[in-house]
Amino acid sequence: MSTEPLTRQPADGSPARPSHWRLHLMRIARVAVALAMSLTSGLVFAKPAQAAPVTYCVPQYYLFTSYGFARPCTRKLDSGSTRRGLHNRATGEIYYSGSFFQGGHILIKDNALATDGFSGFFSGTHAQQTAYGLASYGIHAGATQGRFGWYNFALGKVVPDGDWLTLVKINDDSDPTS
């Protein structure tokens, strides 16, 4: 350990200056303070990170529309609200419609009865709380044809939302995400 004093008194009577060791300690302290401030400044002032919205599309099934192959999708936000749309396979875009609703689970049902009496499988997106109760938008289909519609949980039935279209099963796992 050095016995050098922390300050030196110059012979000419001018004010005392820090010793060599004290200068090093002061530099180390400044660097430590600057480092601590830079590390904690992001923690103190940063906003909490938002999770990216999740996009879910009905797997494998498309309906051939006048715009090309399309399938229902939902975009689910961190808050739990969802918005429905259609994924166009040719453009890769999802065209959203309607407002955001509180969302729930995804529905896939092998034998779903429609309000017009047709029974077939239903593959739906995140359930949404709508004006008519909890419902999932999806594809209601038989072997070769399908239609868009809402599965209404209160009714326990599919409410068709359009005409019958050609059903195509594509195993490409090209679900868009954003």
Image: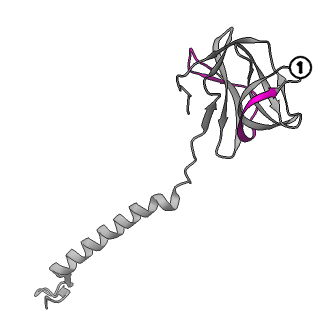
Q: Judge from the rendering whether residue 110 lies leftward or rightward of residue 177; answer left or right.
A: right
Q: Position of residue 98 (x, y in %)?
A: 76, 28
Towards the viewer: 19 or 119: 119
Quarter residue 124 falls in: top right
Instruction: Identify the residue position indicated by label 1 in the image.
Output: 116
Q: Which amino acid does the dot numbered 1 rest on?
A: Asp
User: Is 66 above or below relative to 155?
Assistant: above
- In this view, the residue farthest toward the bottom is 3
User: Is 41 above or below relative to 111?
Assistant: below
Towards the viewer: 7 or 169: 169
**Mark 1 surroundings within 10 Å by alpha-carbon count, few (fewer than 14), some (14 through 19), many (20 or more):** few
Towards the viewer: 19 or 102: 102
Q: Which residues are magenta?
A: 88-112
Q: Judge from the rendering whether residue 70 lies leftward or rightward of residue 39; answer left or right.
A: right
Please give the name of the residue rendered at 57% of the width and 46% of the height, measured from the top-left corner: 51
Q: Judge from the rendering whether residue 77 lies leftward or rightward of residue 127; answer left or right.
A: left
Magenta stretch: residue 104 in it?
A: yes
